DNA sequence: CTGAAAGCGCTTACAG
DNA sequence: CTGAAAGCGCTTACAG
């Protein structure tokens, strides 16, 4: 059974391929094709199960109706949720998604962008710092792109970000309000802008409350294996018995931290309070449940696609370059 | 700046487009193009940053070098990990991935397959039961497809499955060996073959140990919201105080079950042992850590792609129709 | 509304 | 090795 082409449909309908094409692409009004004819053609398409060949259409129009989603690691909870949220919206508006993971590897990220350039109409990217140059090239080539969750300094690329500053502030305020005096802040991956933002926000905010102790800020080197953070956290806590609250800059650090606290037998929250940026399903279930600052994943996805669509449709960069979405403080039992 | 085409490269190299095409596609030997010329052409391609237009090549060859990955929900941990493992292998061998989630909706799954049919060279699918007909159509159309984790009865479609029977057996054996007498088995989503397999394996295996009590098997109706299982589990356990071990057929049930056990203040493992099919990162961290039967995600991905590639390359279905991979019992503290 | 045709950028069979 | 050409299946500008 040969695949049907637009010619076959045209022959069956007794019209010329152009007419079928117009109906498929919703231009029947514009082309003043009778409603009757349009109906007939749609009926034939349905009956025969004809599906247009996208490669051909893409070759002709230069549009692929595919969006490239480039994240750090699709198996990571945050990115997987983001991918799902983006998928939900993208399919609704007629776009497919190809995804790929950079694994935080600049070279891989750059290669992926280059490889997908002609295969996608636009990119949604959570960039690694080393992808800056390649992203600038995309901008120069007027390829639609929107950055999620992370960004570059000194570069005007549309981006949808979480308001890290406000989120951290609300966390510090919660801890300060509850009377904690010696708050540790544990962070890693400082080459990522959002991590820097969180750290800076903590410093500013803790200082404002008179609670900033530089020795209680632990900056861990980035580790590929998350288990690797355990040791550093443990050594740090052992050396800082005065700590009465720990603010983790991201959920995977908090998860490792929880393991350490179990080993150390530091009870939460009586011995030490725990608070994490970026929620995780574990936190809800843990005993005691862990208070966290949740990122608005659905909103990030929605705004990201919306921005990208504006670019893809209008061939121009929309006015709002940077969107800051609020996080949400979810108070549980650990503070 | 206009996009470069193969003609431009040919002009720069002073050859005809065919020659460039042969070099790009690694046919220079076959076409007896001099190594010198091939090198020159490759150099020009590199310098200019020329990337062939895939739409054009696809239109000509009928191959897209894209694989359609259709899972239940990309944001779910199991599928996200699977997606990552598949991505790792697929990109290595030159394939992109488009993904989509069926959300366990037969109609959506069917639509997705139909929509992607001409856009992908093959499908990797974790099917819902209602997709059987559409999958059969693919088979009839000789479209490469491989089923992961789930399958249909009475249909010969290549599939890569976990050996649920052996996994459940090892779990029952562990519980029996430790002397548990009243083992509850909690299951849901019985329209999924793998769930049926687990239930049947439990019955057979428990019976063999003289530990099968039909009233201790809880079959919960499938719920879109996972929280919905909590109530059913709670009512069941309250009514069966004799239970001294619970075997959850899947991890999300176990997670809800853990919540219930907290509320009921049933200590693990002193009051009740807990065992779950399908590992989860929560289990490692939970206090006590939860024993589970882990599915071999990397192996599923590897074998799935391998099988698909055989089909895509050979245009025929490989001999092995069904591959059964062993699970792994991870003994922690909850049993 | 219909018809005829060009052309998107490739790949490949054919002739030399 | 080179050259010339056809054709994959669409979309669209043009003439009527």
Image (tube, coloured by chain):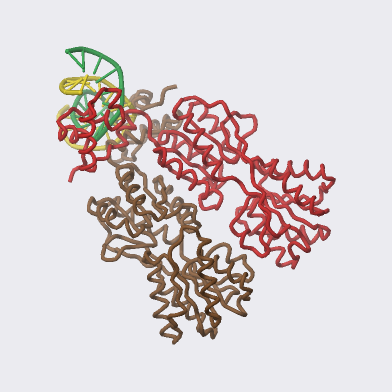
Chain colours: A brown, B red, C green, D yellow
Q: Residue at x 30, y 23 (%)?
A: B30
The image quadrant where one finds the C terminus of chain A is: bottom right
Judge by depth and name the residue closer to the eye, A236 or B304.
A236
Q: Position of residue B329 (x, y in %)?
A: 67, 49
Judge by depth and name the residue closer to the eye, A242 or A322.
A242
Residue extending furthest toward the bottom: A210
On screen, residue B19 above or below B297: above
On screen, residue B165 above or below A156: above
Q: How many marks?
A: 0
Q: Position of residue A57 (x, y in %)?
A: 31, 36
Q: Position of residue A318 (x, y in %)?
A: 28, 59
Judge by depth and name the residue closer to the eye, C7 or B9.
B9
Judge by depth and name the residue closer to the eye, B11 or B195.
B11
Q: Residue at x 15, y 33 (%)?
A: B11
From the viewer's perspective, tell me whether residue C8 is left or right of residue A276. Answer: left
From the viewer's perspective, tell me whether residue B144 is left or right of residue A30. Answer: right
The image quadrant where one finds the N terminus of chain A is: top left
From the viewer's perspective, tell me whether residue B192 is left or right of residue B7. Answer: right
Q: Residue at x 39, y 80 (%)?
A: A204
**Snapshot quadrant of residue B263:** bottom right
Q: Position of residue B107 (x, y in %)?
A: 53, 41
From the viewer's perspective, tell me whether residue A253 is left or right of residue B263. Answer: left
């Amino acid at each position: 059974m040969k695949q049907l082409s637009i010619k076959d449909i045209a022959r069956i309908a007794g019209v010329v391929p152009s007419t079928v094409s117009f109906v498929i692409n919703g231009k029947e009004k514009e082309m003043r094709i009778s409603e009757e004819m349009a109906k007939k053609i749609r009926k034939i398409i349905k009956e025969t199960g004809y599906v247009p060949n996208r490669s051909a259409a893409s070759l002709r129009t230069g549009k692929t109706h595919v969006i490239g989603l480039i994240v750090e690691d699709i198996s990571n909870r945050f990115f997987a949720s983001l991918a799902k949220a983006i998928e939900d919206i993208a399919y609704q508006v007629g776009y497919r998604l190809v995804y790929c993971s950079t694994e935080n590897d600049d070279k891989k990220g750059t290669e992926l962008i280059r490889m997908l350039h002609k295969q996608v109409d636009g990119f949604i990217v959570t960039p690694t710092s080393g992808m800056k140059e390649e992203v600038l090239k995309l901008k120069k080539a007027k390829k639609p792109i929107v950055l999620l969750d992370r960004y570059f300094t000194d570069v005007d690329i549309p981006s949808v970000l979480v308001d890290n500053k406000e989120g951290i502030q609300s966390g510090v305020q919660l801890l300060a309000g509850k009377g904690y005096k010696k708050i540790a802040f544990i962070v890693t991956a400082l080459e990522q802008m959002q991590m820097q933002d969180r750290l800076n926000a903590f410093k500013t905010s803790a200082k404002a409350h008179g609670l900033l102790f530089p020795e209680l800020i632990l900056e861990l080197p980035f580790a590929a294996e998350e288990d690797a953070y355990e040791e550093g956290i443990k050594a740090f806590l052992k050396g800082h018995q005065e700590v009465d609250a720990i603010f983790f800059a991201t959920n995977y650090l908090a998860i490792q931290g929880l393991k350490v606290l179990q080993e150390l037998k530091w009870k939460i929250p009586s011995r030490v309070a725990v608070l994490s940026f970026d929620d995780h399903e574990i936190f809800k279930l843990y005993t005691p449940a862990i208070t966290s600052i949740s990122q608005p994943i659905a909103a990030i996805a929605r705004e990201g696609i919306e921005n990208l669509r504006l670019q893809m449709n209008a061939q121009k960069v929309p006015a709002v370059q940077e969107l800051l979405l609020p996080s949400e403080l979810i108070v549980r039992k650990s503070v």
